[in-house]
Image (cartoon, helix red, strand yellow):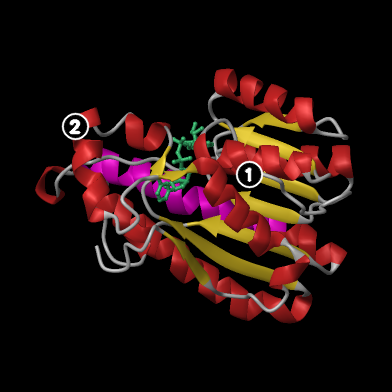
Amino acid sequence: MDCSWNFKGKCCIVTGAASGIGKQISILLAQSGAKVVLVDIDAENLISATNACKEVANVAPLSIVADVSKQQDVMRMVESTVAHFEKIDFLVTGAGILYRTQFLDIELAEWDEVMNTNIRGLFLCNQLVVAQMLKQGEGRIVNIASVAGRSMSLIGGAHYATSKHAVIGLTRHMARELCQQGIRVNAFCPGATSTPMIHDNLSAEQITDLKPRIPLGRLAEADEQARVIAFMLSDAASYLNGACIDSNGGSVML
Ligand SMILES: NC(=O)c1ccc[n+]([C@@H]2O[C@H](COP(=O)([O-])OP(=O)(O)OC[C@H]3O[C@@H](n4cnc5c(N)ncnc54)[C@H](O)[C@@H]3O)[C@@H](O)[C@H]2O)c1
């Protein structure tokens, strides 16, 4: 699809960039002229995502292997980005994990793992990146939440849904605190999207059963979600702040 965003010269950090939605927004940003920083814990897939960006980019992307739940890693992510590109204009937080475990079976270690990645990690990235954006006097952040944070999850467990509600709460609070200093913060809430997160957790039969429950009758493709995130980062969305943008094929009440 023809994409006419112009992000020339903008530096964007994308976490969870090795796969799925994070990979697609990285490619779209690179195509649109941005200086992309791909961040992921998965070093192997990060190489192929970075290579996909290189093929379409004018400016060579930077890739950083990091665990977003670790403060040292996130500090290194920010320092390396500023050392390389001198600034951070945009942050997209795509790093996330999902378990399907039923409520009573969730062990504390699994609860902590989900929270550490999906909300502690997202908080760390936001806090350290905002500190840099404040020095610049502007910035735009899209935190990837989920339809699970708007109601509940048909796929993930209670820990996943809880973490995604927390992403929306953090986003709204930051939006209120930071907008007068030039920083817009919004949450993106995808519905079921065809990525490894879905295909690793659901059988082909379970995916077939899921489709009729989505009004559009199909899963989203990751690049369809990336285009909405690009709009949220763009000048066209200049009045968007503290919003939760749903992109779920009409699954308003799951
Ligand atoms: N696919 C969906 O249906 C769907 C729906 C709603 C929300 N989401 C959310 O969208 C985001 C992207 O999901 P996706 O579907 O592209 O999943 P994905 O599994 O394809 O990609 C997630 C990426 O995050 C990385 N990651 C996981 N833990 C990390 C950590 N600690 N540090 C750094 N990177 C880490 C993974 O290695 C992976 O590359 C996630 O936050 C997910 O919860 C996805």
Point 53% across, 50% down: residue: 225
Foreground: disc 2 or disc 1: 2
Q: Depth check: 92 or 237 in front?
A: 237
Range drawn in magenta: 107-129
- Inter-mark Cα distance, 2 to 1: 28 Å
Point 53% across, 32% down: residue: 19
Q: Earlier in the sequence, mark 2 or mark 1?
A: 1
Q: Depth check: 79 or 204 in front?
A: 204
Assign the magenta stretch its main secondary structure: helix
Specify the label residue 25 is tagged with.
1
- The quadrant holding residue 6 is bottom right
Give percent across and percent down for residue 21: 53, 42
Instruction: Work out whether 32 lies above or below 54.
Output: below
Q: Disc count in the image? A: 2
Tell me, yes or no, whether the highlighted magenta stretch contains residue 121: yes
Q: Depth check: 118 or 236 in front?
A: 236
Mark 2 residue type:
Glu
Specify the label residue 205 is tagged with.
2
Tell me, yes or no, whether the highlighted magenta stretch contains residue 232: no
Q: Is residue 203 visible?
A: no
Quadrant containing the N terminus is: top right
Contact between marks 2 and 1 (CB within 8 A): the answer is no
